[in-house]
């Protein structure tokens, strides 16, 4: 059990601190959140909301229920119990189905109608801020920027460089940007990370904690999306970045008085970069590095950002904040790094390659990477083909016609791996054309995955899906794939009749 005691506001070293004692495993800890005194009036000591949200992730992982001494906003409690907790537990059965023991209230809190977002000076935060400085609907425009210290300034990231030094440099930069945007900057501090650790996996919760701690200020808060909306996922969420399901969690944290938005998820990182590179404010203050108070140019975040800005042809404008000369001298090294990571399917590097291809930048590089990607997929498909042919033999299944999803350039000349795959299937195929004239089709494996359940069918689907989902071009759907296989499972027929 975790018990969250009544939050209180105290003054400490000229700052105002909202804190609550937590009893976790019979140990008393104090979780606190600190702001400048001028923001003290917004600290929400009347309710447990902020502290409850701070504890959810930890409690579910460590098998705790939670008791709150102060009431919780009724809507928040409802959202957590009805939506968030059941959804998280269903996708990760090892998590504890958290029970919350508390009173609740539907009374409205006083609220100053503030609209805020974090300003770390990274791509996501600049994108969010610039979208809401002067938007069409002025009721959605920012009134404040925030910079939080809730875990990103840790020894793992800034160890050798110095946590305090990095923090000071990053806060100074945020102050500069806030002044240029003519918005007040709220500088906060907290010991969240010391208590809960695991920053990456729970940073949605830690950010929501900082927002709810000031919930008498905010009516809207934008949290910059780390992923695109279509990447929403609860699969294995207990081992992943909580930002994958921000669309769910932020919706659940929202109440009638405080609306959270997951901002910018309609765009990928490269597209967000494209949207901000022309602003001098960004050219002079962009900071993406998680190793130094300046952009080191070596860590993966620096590399990815420089490659993206280079693809946009704007790198020279960023010479104040990135080691552009060094990049130009070592372009080959950067490109090799991009190739390696794109082939290992780092999603950001894959996106950069696609972006370069789209912009016609380094065409020989993108062509080479694309060819290598095909080769990697083909090699992976060989193992599956071996397994499938074995299944076909066991079940004495004959394939009437074999269609291999070859790339157009290889239609006439199957390469070594393709030939080996064909050889494996040969005993089962009555070929309607010689091997040199393999038919190439684009297909959509997801379309028929659901109905083909028996093992050979599943393997065939898996084998094809090695080539990635592509749009259907020639009516290659589940009807067509059924015709490839002379024996159809009864269940599939029944499903068809329905
Ligand atoms: Zn760096």
Image (cartoon, rainbow, N blue to C red):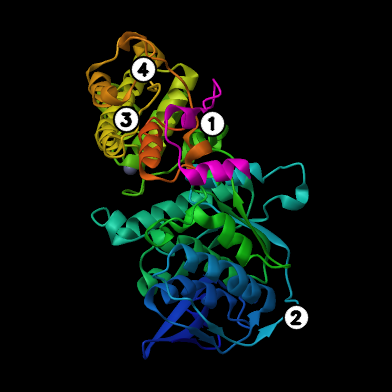
The residue at which mark 3 appears reads as 377
Report the Cα–Cα distance between label 4 and label 2.
61 Å
Q: Position of residue 201 (x, y in %)?
A: 41, 61
Q: Disc 4 or disc 2, which is closer to the eye?
A: 4
Magenta highlight on residue 295: no
- Is residue 326 something one can see in this rendering? no
Are the residues flagged by discs 4 and 1 in contact, CB closer than 8 Å?
no
Closer to the N terminus: mark 1 or mark 2? 2
Q: In the depicted view, which residue is nearer to us: 214 or 174?
A: 214
The residue that label 1 is drawn on is 479
Decide if residue 328 is on the left or right side of residue 6: left
Marks 1/2: CA–CA distance: 58 Å
Residue 495 part of the magenta-drawn span? yes
Position of residue 293 measured from the top left corner of the image (x, y, whole percent)? 36, 49
> Which labelled disc corresponds to residue 107?
2
Q: Residue at x 74, y 75 (%)?
A: 110
Q: Is disc 1 surrounded by few (<14), some (14 to 19) or many (20+) residues within 10 Å?
A: few
Sequence-first tag of 3 and 2: 2
Camera-side mark, 3 or 1 = 1
Q: Earlier in the sequence, mark 3 or mark 1?
A: 3
Q: Residues within 10 Å of mark 2 (few under 14, many from 20)?
A: few
In terms of secondary structure, where does tag 1 sit?
helix
> What residue range appears in magenta?
471-498
Residue 367, disc = 4
């Amino acid at each position: 059990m975790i018990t969250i005691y009544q939050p209180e506001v105290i003054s400490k070293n000229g700052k105002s601190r909202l804190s609550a004692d937590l009893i976790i495993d019979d140990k008393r800890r104090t979780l606190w959140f600190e702001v400048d005194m001028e923001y003290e009036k917004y600290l929400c000591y009347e309710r447990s909301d902020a502290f409850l949200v701070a504890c959810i992730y930890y409690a579910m992982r460590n098998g705790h229920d939670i008791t709150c001494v102060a009431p919780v906003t009724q809507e928040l409690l409802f959202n957590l119990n009805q939506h968030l907790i059941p959804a998280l537990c269903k996708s990760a059965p090892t998590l504890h189905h958290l029970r919350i023991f508390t009173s609740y209230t539907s009374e409205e809190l006083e609220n100053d109608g503030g609209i805020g977002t974090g300003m770390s000076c990274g791509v996501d935060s600049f994108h969010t801020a610039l979208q809401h400085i002067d938007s069409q609907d002025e009721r959605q425009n920012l009134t404040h920027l925030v910079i939080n210290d809730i875990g990103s300034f840790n020894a793992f990231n800034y160890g050798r460089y110095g946590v305090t030094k990095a923090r000071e440099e990053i806060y100074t930069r945020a102050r500069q940007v806030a002044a240029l945007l003519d918005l007040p900057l709220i500088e906060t501090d907290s010991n969240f990370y010391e208590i809960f650790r695991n920053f990456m996996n729970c940073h949605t919760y830690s950010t929501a904690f900082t927002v709810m701690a000031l919930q008498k200020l905010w009516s809207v808060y934008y949290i910059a999306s780390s992923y695109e909306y279509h990447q929403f996922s609860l699969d294995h969420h207990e081992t992943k970045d909580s930002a994958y399901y921000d669309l769910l969690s932020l919706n659940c944290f929202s109440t009638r008085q405080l609306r959270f938005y997951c901002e910018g998820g309609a765009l990928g990182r490269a597209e967000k970069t494209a949207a901000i590179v022309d602003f001098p404010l960004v050219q002079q203050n962009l900071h993406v590095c998680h190793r130094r108070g300046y952009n080191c140019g070596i860590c993966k975040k620096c590399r990815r950002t420089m490659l993206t800005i280079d693809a946009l042809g704007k790198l020279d404008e960023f010479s104040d904040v990135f080691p552009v000369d060094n990049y130009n001298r070592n372009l080959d090294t950067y490109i090799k790094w991009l190739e390696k990571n794109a082939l290992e399917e780092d999603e950001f590097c894959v996106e950069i390659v696609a972006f370069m291809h789209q912009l016609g930048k380094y065409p020989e590089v993108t062509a080479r990477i694309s060819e290598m990607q095909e080769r990697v997929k083909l090699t992976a498909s060989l193992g599956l083909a071996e397994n499938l042919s074995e299944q076909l033999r066991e079940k004495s299944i004959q394939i009437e016609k074999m269609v291999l999803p070859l790339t157009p350039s290889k239609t006439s000349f199957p390469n070594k791996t393709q030939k080996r795959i064909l050889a494996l299937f040969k005993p089962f195929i009555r070929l309607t054309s010689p091997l040199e004239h393999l038919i190439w089709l684009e297909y959509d494996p997801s379309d028929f995955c659901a109905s083909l359940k028996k093992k050979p069918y599943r393997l065939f689907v898996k084998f094809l899906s090695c080539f990635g989902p592509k749009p259907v071009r020639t009516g290659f759907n589940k009807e067509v794939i059924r015709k490839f296989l002379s024996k159809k499972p009864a269940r599939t027929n029944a499903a068809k009749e329905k």
